[in-house]
Structure formats: C-alpha cells, structure tokens
Image (cartoon, rainbow, N blue to C red):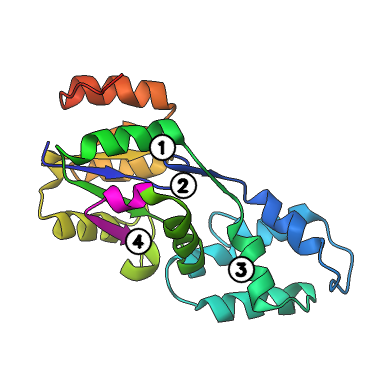
Amino acid sequence: MDAIFFDLGGVIVDFDHRSIAHDLLGTEAGTRALASEEVHQWLFHPTTGLINAFNAGRISPQEFHGTICRKFGLTLSFDRFVHIWSNIFSENRRVSRMIHALAGTFPLFLISNTDPLHFEYIVAQYPVLQAFEAWILSYEVGACKPDEKIFVAASQRAGVAPDRSVFIDDIPAYVAAAKKLGFRTIHYESAGTLKAVLTALLPFQFPD
C-alpha cells in the first residue's frame, strides 16, 4: 500500500454530539421550552441537519452560530458558542499510538467530514494530527463523505491510485463508497481489530 487514509471522528477522536444540544439549552437565553432531542435532530439529522451545510463549507462559523441562535431564541455569544460546540472530543489513544508507529513507514492522510470550528479545536488539542502528510477536509473540498468528490480529492492530494490505498472509517456507508471507487477499505470497529487487520494487510509489525 502506498498510502493510508484515516477518518477522524469515531476513529482517532470520539465525540458526543448530544452534549451540544444539552449545553445549548442550558444557557440562560432560551426563549421557549425545548427538548434537547429536538435541537439535536435539527442540527445533526443525516440529511436535513444544519451540520451538513456547515461541514460542506456552505455557511461560515458566524452564519452557523447566528442561524442556531435565531432558530432557538438564544442570546449566546460567539465565543461561548464555540466552547459548547467544540468541547465534545476525547482522543482514542490506542489509535493515536498506531498512527505514530505507521508515520515513519507509510504516507498517512486524513479524510474527515468536519467544520472549521471542530477541526481548529482538534488540531490544537491533539498532536497526533501532525503525523499526517495532508488533511482532506469536507468544508475545504465542498463535499462530504460519501460523496465521491472528497475521495477523488484525497487520491489526487496523495498522488496515489485508490487501489494502492487503504481507507479506514467507522461509518459503513462511507466505507462502501470508498470501496466502490477502488480503495482497499477497513471498517473500524475497535483499536484491537484495526491493529490486527493492518498488521496482516500491510504487512507491518507494531511495537508492543
């Protein structure tokens, strides 16, 4: 394999979107009673959620913040919103150790559906992101997985044919989309399973 492409959320970092909805409603500025599930669905629904436009780079962070405040009657400063929006991640240290081990031998790339606020926070918090040669980000490409545009952009950025690449993701639909384009794929389920599959596929011996 000439390149390994990692997903970010659900593989390198874990996250809890539901805490965002809960914390937004915990601010003092709500003008009507809302269930956090209503907020969560409006923001994160796979097809209609506002997150889709934000991840695809169609709205700016300021527009995203303003739209949420208007929708739910919040008088929430942008800085406070950024904190609530971004303070949801934790590092998968077992995967990070694998990435550091691979970095000296294989070109590593990141493909992520993300937004500028989340990614800026993750880069600042988790040094493992510096192990990648390039980041292919949905808000910069203008397309989100499983759109083939982001996978094509990733192959072009790496200068590697899909069939000489490995793509790792925790979302089955994204794995299927990459496989359709010719990538070797791994559906991420656990760090232990990923380590065993990569050891056999590459081949590569991870340090104990």
The disc at residue 172 is: 1
Which residue does the numbered mark 4 point to in the structure image? 137
Residue 133: name its quadrant.
Answer: bottom left
Which residue does the numbered mark 3 point to in the structure image? 82
Element at badge 2? loop
Which residue does the numbered mark 2 point to in the structure image? 9
Q: Amino acid at mark 1?
A: Pro
x and y percentages locating residue 181 in the rendered image:
21, 46
x and y percentages locating residue 70 in the rendered image:
73, 79
Distance of label 1 from label 2 (alpha carbons): 14 Å
Q: Nearer the viewer, residue 76 or 97?
A: 97
Comes first in the chain, label 1 or label 2 = 2
x and y percentages locating residue 129 in the rendered image:
35, 51
Crowdedness of circle 3 by 10 Å Cα count: few (<14), some, many (20+)?
Answer: some
Kindly report which numbered mark, 4 or 3, lies closer to the viewer in this rendering: 3
Distance of label 4 from label 1 (alpha carbons): 19 Å
In what quadrant of the picture does the C terminus appear? Answer: top left
Drawn side of residue 208 relative to residue 26, left or right: left
Crowdedness of circle 1 by 10 Å Cα count: few (<14), some, many (20+)?
Answer: few
Comes first in the chain, label 2 or label 4 = 2
Element at badge 3? helix
